Amino acid sequence: LAASARADRQRSRWLLEVSFELPADPARGVRAKAYLAPSNVAPTEAEGHDTVLRLAAQLGLDPRPYEELGEAIRPDGLTSERPCSLMLGLSATASGASLEAYLFDPGRA
């Protein structure tokens, strides 16, 4: 995930936000999550979108659910005019990893 960050941000001190889920039932296992804030993903929404697609491909994940959600939330498209409002996350358990993408209101990003 850190390697997916903007090149000019990869050496920043707090590049990733990390959290751990400790379930009440220990048999479910711990889930570790790491996130990149929108400003660390890309300068624009369009570039952030490309970052999500690249990371999904690297992880061997189908990007179509993300693309469909993006189309529903931003019917006008993800543009290079708006600052990036995509937060990216990776979630991992003993059973595997998943990619998380959060798309925020561009006025609040």
Image (cartoon, rainbow, N blue to C red):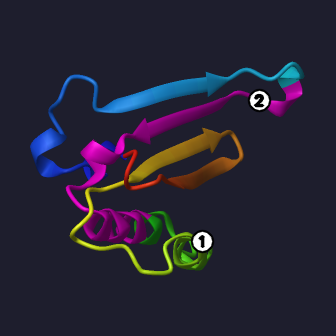
Identified at 68% across, 39% down, the residue is 94
Q: Compared to 15, does 7 lie above or below?
A: below
101 is higher (above) or lower (below) than 69: above
Q: Which residues are magenta?
A: 27-55
Q: Amino acid at mark 2?
A: Gly
Seen as rendered, the residue at the extreme front is 107
The kind of secondary structure element at disc 1 is: helix
Q: Residue 90: x, y in percent?
A: 51, 46
Residue 62 on image: x %, y %: 57, 75
Q: Is residue 90 left or right of residue 23?
A: left
Q: Is residue 10 magenta?
A: no
The secondary structure type at the circle numbered 2 is loop
Q: Which residue is mark 2?
A: 29
Q: Is residue 78 above or below residue 3?
A: below
Q: Nearer the viewer, residue 84 or 8?
A: 84
- Residue at 31% in and 64% down: 45
Give residue 69's mark: 1
